[in-house]
Amino acid sequence: MIAPRLRRRLGRGLLLGFFSVLLVAYVAGPVAWLVSSSLQTDAQITAIPPNWLPPEPTLANFEAIFGAKSEVVTYETRRQGDPATTRFLPSGAENLLPSLANSFSVGLWVALLNLVLSVTAAYAIAVIPFRGRRGALYAILVTRVIPDIALIVPLFLLVRALGLVNTQTALVTTYLAVTIPFTIFILISYFESIPADLYRAARVDGCSHVAALRHVYLPLALPAVIASLMFAFLTSWNEFIFALILTQNVAAQTLPIVISGFVMDFTTSFSFVNAAGVIAIVPPVVLAMLFERYIVSGLTAGAVKG
Amino acid sequence: MTKSTRFGRRAALAGSAAAIGALAATGGRAQARPINFTAWSAAVDQVKSHISAFEKATGNKVNYENFPWAQYRTSVVTRLVGNAPMDVLWVSDAWLPEFAEAGWLAPIDDIPELMKYNADAAAYCTNSMVYKAKQYGLSYYGDHMSFVYNTELLQKAGISAPPTTWDEVVQQSLRIKQGGHAEYPLLLALAIDTWLVEFMSAMVFSNGGRFTDDRGDAVMADAARGAVSTAQWLRDAIHTHKIVSPGAVETTEINALRAIGAGQAAFAIVPTYRLRALNDPSQASAAGKIRPALMPRGPRATASTTCGWIRFFGMTPGAKADRARRAPAVQFMEFFGGKDNTGSYTLQKLLLTDLGLPFCTLPLQNDADVKSFWEKWAGGSAVISQQAASAQKKDVVAPWFGEWNETSNQAWQSVFLARATPEAATTAMARKWAELKKG
Amino acid sequence: MQMFRGLSYDERNAWLLVAPVFAVLVAVALYPIAYSFYTSLYDIVLTRPWRRPFVGTGNYERILADPQFWIAVQRTTVYTLVTVAATTILALGVALLLNEAFPGRRLLSALILLPWATPSIVNGLMWKWIYDPSYGLLNALLLKLGMIERYTVWLGDPAKTLFMIANAAVWKQMPLAAILMLVTMKAIPADLYRAARVDGANAFQRFIHVTLPALKPGFMLVLVYETMISIRHFDLFLIMTQGGPGDASYTLSWQIYVETFRSLKFGLGAALSYILAMATFLLSWMFIRMLGRGMEK
């Protein structure tokens, strides 16, 4: 005879456990396969039945990525189809790590600038009663309804006129325009859940808007702010079409472009591409793990007394 | 190209503003300006090494940018519309009329340093670079569709020689299928891909058919001369004989390569350059077993034919018109599309020996290294040379190719999916062609 | 400065705080938007540069009369509906799960970031490989579980194509949606739950009457964002199917790409973009009106 409370808790635990396992399988399953295939050779990943685990794990793909040196390529140093070696890896592998650095740098700038620009604007629109609030919000959102494909030619013209082709600046500015509307939207939605009494109390106390923002709203809205930062960083990290058009070589090319170069290159090795994919996932996940506690286990509702 | 509309003027304004700015930045000094070369991400190391040699030999600097092939056209069109400073670029033969009409390529007929290489080049290569009686570049890669077979699978099924007609392909495939050696013996990459038009052209030509006649009018829907019998054959292969997988509609050229290399197909059609990878043990488990055979014939064809294509170096009108840019650009095109300073076709040979890319230069085919290459990777060059001699260029290359190709791809897929009859599909293609030609 | 004279302290501050954002957007977004609208009013075909007549609404009329356009509308509608619905429901479930305290929750919430961190090109290729009819994992797995008898075609089967692509999209987009829901959940005051418990409500009733209504802003965020991006999804279509097989995955977004970069009809492509943009705006506006609170309503 199990006490009702214990039974309830067991039931709850089982339910949670079951769904947790499902969730892990769903999100991590494909990535686990990605990792597994990156440790195999091309011949092994096309086997039937498939090799769930690498039969003889090989780090050849990762060695190629990390060991690739960017040097002046001459007839002597060029990479060729060498039958004697057991691996055939695409040229351009040496671009992967620099592009990783580019992606990282661009993502960080976009996240930071989003923090500065979006938080202040969202505060203004959500909290301060002024004419044209609604119009401002819609105006900001409207900039994102045009499909990206339609924007790339004029954007290229604009960037070229400013002499910024193939620079990180062009990417950062473009991604700011891409991410700001939605981060503002997220923040507005969250700011509004904070009771207006707090705002009025702060203003009565003589706080300026900036002070109210800093001392009252930001701390309470931390989960939403973190979510916005993550959104800004990851959107920049993953973005493809603008980076394709605005950059032309490894000086500013980001990770997705370099990876797509491997795939469409006719000397393609899918296990290598998957290895590159694994590397593409690592930095954002590490960053996000550092910040997730602010979202999941962060400030709970107790701070917002109704 | 007249700039009578504001659209053109705005773009020109942006371009000239940038140009003036650039000029001011250099202080107006006459400087060795780098040559801007745009290509897709193929043979990157080979191109880079050749660039190093070029820079050392001529003292010019090269600005090399490359994009993934699947996005190359998008990137290059954007840049050309945006008047980006491009000098030399890689072009696919299918785009020649479009790019020429849009004013993005300059004819080289008046540049004797480049035209002299035509003497060494195969006829279909040179013809592929000619539009409206003007030539627009120098080729570095010329290839054709090869019919390949897996020696081991044929042996297991007790077949002594590869098929010579498409009927034999069906018979041999059925034998292999019934023997349990391969479920879908004929592997075709039928996905909507840049290669679909070449695959289909090869099959149509080999069946003795054509898409357009010599006047450029559509004959693809003509039961006697066109693509109808090919479409019928393919539909039967997938749905009646079941020798081609229904999943072929999602198989792209690269995925097909994987499958052939894994030894899952007894027969396939591949670009010849793929033979290098297919017989490489580090890339394919079926290495050493993939051999080319002459493209099978249809009942109406008298000899084996296939589809050939080229890629070439083109020059922009901006580079040609600008006195400072023209000489280095011409030098570049000669070094890369013709002979370099050592007097040999170094790049073409490099592309072949490293990556298996065939070339257009006829004298080079007698080179000892070239011969031993084909011996090693394809079991000999006889079939390949013979097939290359019979390759026809695509007959649908026109200024409206891009738009027509979309309709054509859809029509072919509707045949593969058995959603349209061969007659209906080819009629749709023909109608679109006529409509675009008139417009 | 003249115009600031008539504004209150509040209004002045508000506009000052909003100004930098507008500056960025005007600098980067205004010109391209205006340019593409302008282009849509002309009949511009790049292979015919000498003739670019003004056609006003001509492009729009041509599009509405084109049967291929309506096919694309149908494809886009199905795809967007499926993707948005699946993402929202899954995200709600995941957020509910993560809102509970249990050991391993931190690890779980870190793991759900994996799909979000995957660049769309890797995502597309990975799923394309998983769906492969010859050696894909999906076939192998389902065969092993006895759910199918033989290897099936997934992506290449026109009846399934949109759903397979949607699955790849949902997999990647769900984490962000879940986080947005979770953030909104965190803002629900604990008092409401306590009051409901005092009134005798069980877990399910608490969910229906406390959680769901308070999640309206979360739903709004997710629905607006997911709709906006799903309706315009392009990367996955480029990598996985290129509009095929046949026209099974020929969405509006794909049509824009084809018209602009393959047929080189810039005017028509721009007009199509504007039609898609209007649809996107209408849908977003609708969601904001329905679910927003405070100033949005």
Image: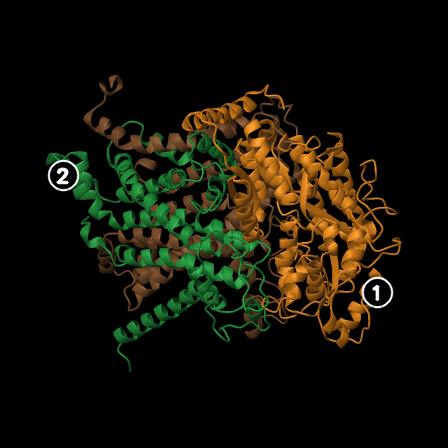
Colour assigned to chain A in the rendering is green
Amino acid under disc 2: Ala
Q: Is residue A294 visible?
A: yes
Q: Nearer the viewer, mark 1 or mark 2?
A: 1
Q: Quadrant of the N terminus of chain A?
A: bottom left
Q: Residue at x 83, y 35 (%)?
A: B215
Secondary structure state at the residue bearing disc 2? helix
Q: What residue is shown with label 1?
A: B168
Q: Colour of chain B?
A: orange
Q: Residue B145's x, y, as percent? A: 73, 54
In this orientation, does residue B250 appear?
no
Q: What hue does chain C carry in this figure?
A: brown
Question: In the displayed structure, does residue A205 sit left or right of residue B300?
Answer: left
- Mark 2 Cα-neighbour bin, 10 Å: few <14, some 14–19, many ≥20: few
Above or below, C24 against B193 in this view is above
Which residue corresponds to the image point at 37% horizontal and 62% vertical from the top-left?
C111
Give the amino acid at mark 1.
Glu
Image mark 2: chain: A
Q: Position of residue C73 (x, y in %)?
A: 58, 42
| Residue found at the far top of this picture | C2
Front residue (pair A174, B77): B77
- Say which residue label 2 marks: A201
